[in-house]
Amino acid sequence: MDLYTLTAHEIRDMIKEKKISSKEATQSALDRIAQVEDKVESFVTVLGDEAIAQAEKIDAKIASGEEVGALAGVPMALKDNMCTKDVLTTCSSKMLYNFKPPYNATVTEKLAGADTVLLGKVNMDEFAMGSSTENSYYKKTKNPYDITKVPGGSSGGSAASVAADEAFFTLGSDTGGSIRQPAALCGCVGLKPTYGSVSRYGLIAFASSLDQIGPMTKDVKDCAMVLDQIAGYDAKDSTSVNIQHPNFEAALTGDIRGLKIGVPQEYFGQGISEEVTAAVNAALSNMKAEGAEFSDMSLPLNEYALPAYYMISSAEASSNLARFDGVKYGYRAEKFNDLIDLYCQTRSEGFGAEVKRRIMIGTYALSSGYYDAYYKKAQQVRTMIMNDFGKAFETYDVLVTPASPTTAFGIGEKTSDPLEMYMADICTVSVNIGGLPAIVIPCGYDKNGLPIGIQIIGKPFDEATVLNAAYALEKTITKVKPNL
Amino acid sequence: MKITREEVLHVAKLARLNLTEEETTRLMEDMGSIIGFADKLNELDTEGVVPTAHAIPMQNAFRKDEIAESFPREEILKNAPDSDGEGFLIPKVVE
């Protein structure tokens, strides 16, 4: 048996029980990376020797009987927008081609504290803007189930590396679906926690009121286990919420008797493929067989979520990305006339087409004369969408929807029309607007063997119910690994 | 929704971007279709609706105004494209 095929919790337990060493688990993952990386291209940076050295250090701690962290020795990877001290953090952009942060993101620090092993940094759409990872400056990550297809995005490297067994788990970030849509397309588990649950300190910001970091894993138990390590209040993030989180892994009972599921009909219409609809309906029947109750309901404002999202996220992005000016870190243009031209040339050469497009849209929406019509309007619609969710959760414990309108699409298929690409997020953006927790897990495969994802949305800070519902459903699904 | 060349160039100036001719033409089209898509929001009556900036109710997050340790200067300057060891260097702005 190859260790790399195992889940993160299995590896954790085997290291704890001294059946294997962290070095063996790490070497297995590195061997797997060497074996499949030329096909999948998940990683921007692989830390070979460093990862082995870290694993040896943890093994020595275990051997000496020293107290170790909860995930001692488990190898993992981080999306390349999470700061790692002295390790390249590029956001998959030319703008940060040489950026080695002087500090760790809080999630990096927490996972180091849990004694995990960092295998490297994984690919993404530049600055997390995109739904296919085709906007990376460095490489196009492939879907492990079919390497002519995209892995989804923006956390495409996080999803593909987990699906390809290159990492036991990864972290992704989700602004409009960037954890959940690639999880759906790559057949892994991805959770976007409630806004404020996981610290954003050291996450290079895209849209600050929407961004959340979350786990991308091989199964639901792994997801709960990782969330246990990264959730929690952080004084360094002023939007971090100070509440007591339960132990998510311990809360997994698999008992969903009496769970009230709402099924918003707006998610099952035009543009959603028949195979996706059929798989989600079959999953709902499975959950009913496990004792849950479901009924059709309506979220009438859902169709306004996507336009509101693109106004809000682009406005925030245009403001956040103003910091990239060629002065403090990262790329600087070689030729310029004066200071203003230094900024302009650096930004024009350092940013890719999609990032420029979002900065332009956002700047437009915030500019004099358009602020009320677009930005403020979108924020008002945000309030209305949140009220819709609030009302729904008076009746239902969770809402269940497809995670992506289709299974993985072809590389290059949607790159010519930005709006068509934006539609890939149609099932996921409203959750970020509402700040809600939502998980995506595989619930079947289409006729070509591509994974189909299902989304379970919960009440704010009720990740435990969302995870448990997913855990119960997962037991009824037969998973198929990609054939690489 | 039609976005003119002048509008694109004005917004690019605000955003500190130098656009090529090709990019300008492409952005007229793309911004037109994306802003046009956002015009869908006008179907909703938002009169009197309070805008939401954050999904969770938040007050200003203050901390105590205390002196804490900061990064060593050389750590911060390590990533600078140009530095004299004491600060970030930029082109001369005052003649």
Image (tube, grey):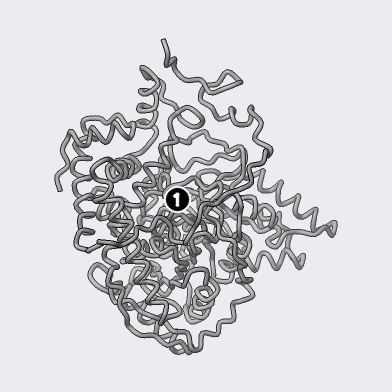
**Residue A172 seen anywhere in this rendered image of the structure:** yes
Image x and y of residue A81, in percent: 50, 46
Q: Which residue is mark 1?
A: A208
Q: Nearer the viewer, residue A6 or A298?
A: A298
Residue at x 24% of width, y 33% of height: B10
Q: Nearer the viewer, residue B55 or A144?
A: B55
Above or below, A276 against A33 in this view is: below
Looking at the rendered structure, the secondary structure element under dot 1 is loop
Badge 1: few (under 14), some or many (20 or more) residues near its Cα, within 10 Å?
many
Judging from the image, mark 1 belongs to the subunit labelled: A
Residue at x 43% of width, y 30% of height: A325
Above or below, A319 against A231 in this view is: above
Image x and y of residue A209, in percent: 43, 54
Q: Residue furthest right?
A: A64
Left or right: A207 in relation to B46: right
Residue at x 45% of width, y 89% of height: A289
Mark 1 belongs to which amino acid?
Ser
Which image quarter: residue A453?
bottom left
Q: Nearer the viewer, residue A282 or A260?
A: A260
Which image quarter: residue A95?
top left
Numbered marks: total: 1
Left or right: A311 in relation to A219: left
**Residue A34 seen anywhere in this rendered image of the structure:** no
Residue at x 41% of width, y 37% of height: A322
Image x and y of residue A188, in percent: 48, 65
